[in-house]
Image (spheres, rainbow, N blue to C red):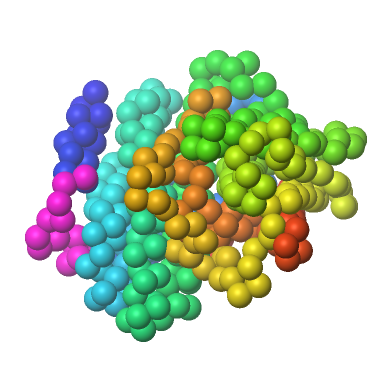
Amino acid sequence: MALRASLRQCLRGVGAPPMRGLASFYDKRVEKWSELTPPVVSVADLFVPTTAVSDAALMSSASLLNTNIAVRLAKRIQVMNSMPFIFGINPNVHRMYHLYYRAFALLSECRAPTTVSEVMHLSQGLYTELLTETAAIVPTLARASKELNSKVLEGMMDKNELTSFFNTMLSGRLLRRLLMHHHLMLTKQYLEPDAIPNHRGVISNHCDVYECAQRAFEAVRRICLQKYGCAPTLLIERGPDRPMRYVESHIIFMLIEVFKNSARATIEHQGRVSENLSPVQLSVFQTEPGVVQIKVKDEGGGIPLDLTDSIFDYGFSTFVPSTNDDTLDTLVDSGLPIGVTARPIDGEGFGLPMTRQYARFFGGDLQILVTQGFGTEVHIRLQEPRAISLESID
């Protein structure tokens, strides 16, 4: 209970106007921790076939968590400290800096648990609340990318430097949240061994890509109905089942972002009448053992030729909101895994580059093929991360 109260008190000012004279910029603890090498994250340890969670496994996961995430947060804070002045005065960057620093302060001062009881106390208190509070990073990053992209266009920031910053921020965030969410799911399985069938923590040992696609598309369909009053259907060209060992929430997030683009393009290209809309098509192929290829195809007119080189730029969007558009902040999370929220259907300029980062996290990739005047194909390559090293991710 004390930890919960401490976290609430520490994070109370996160949404407030920027604080003057942030001590964290000069905090020697950040500099000291950023020079440490974080404990090695072994993918093989995460992707364990068994679903049983022993005392030793739970203790090992918890002891890794504090130091690992605190070191990685310190490294991110130092990167933000080294960015140009025009970057640091952005209000969304300032808010993100607060979130990172406060999470670092709590974790760096929290000693590693020595008993299962202490693990439970941390899991149900500090770890759960940190996971919830830091969820605000993505919308904050999205707003920052859009604002800072305008500085690139004005020649006040370097595009490559900004792209590198957002890439490393996202890959680092993915790893930190994966470790924290994985630990919390292990804790749940420790208490209730049958609570999450076919899972080891956050890892699904039998991930059904088709089911993930249907859940993702349902979230997008509801957003479309609220925004446009209509929605295309999803046509699944179903072949043999292609189960794989993967993080279901990652697949659902990627498909939500891709489906949003396809649905919006279809509606705006073909008109706002559901009966007249071509379906968004999905196919799944197993190209080699442990590798699954997802193809999403639409007939939304494609992407203008002069914009194709910009589709993976952070902050870039083809959408121009109307002055009376009141649906941009609509979120959908009902029926989705913990940590996955279907954000607005358009306008952020963050979905595609972030989706590609998700795909590349475990060694996969995302590619786009455009047929001008007809439509777009998105190819997502997923790779079971049995032999992928995450040691280089900060």
In terms of image quadrants, where is residue 275? top right
- Part of the protein shown in magenta: 15-28
Q: How many marks?
A: 0
Q: Residue at x 15, y 51 (%)?
A: 17
Q: Residue at x 21, y 46 (%)?
A: 14
Q: Residue at x 47, y 71 (%)?
A: 163
Depth check, front residue: 330 or 333: 330
The percent coordinates of residue 125 (x first, y second) are: 32, 28
Residue 29 lies in the magenta stretch: no
The percent coordinates of residue 221 (x first, y second) are: 60, 33
Q: Is residue 299 above or below residue 152?
A: above
Residue 389 visible in the picture:
no
Q: Tell me: 152 left or right of 357.
A: left
Q: Residue at x 57, y 66 (%)?
A: 312
Q: Tell me: 302 left or right of 125.
A: right
The percent coordinates of residue 269 (x first, y second) are: 64, 52
Residue 20 lies in the magenta stretch: yes
The percent coordinates of residue 391 (x first, y second) are: 56, 60
Quick one: which residue is furthest to the right in this view? 240
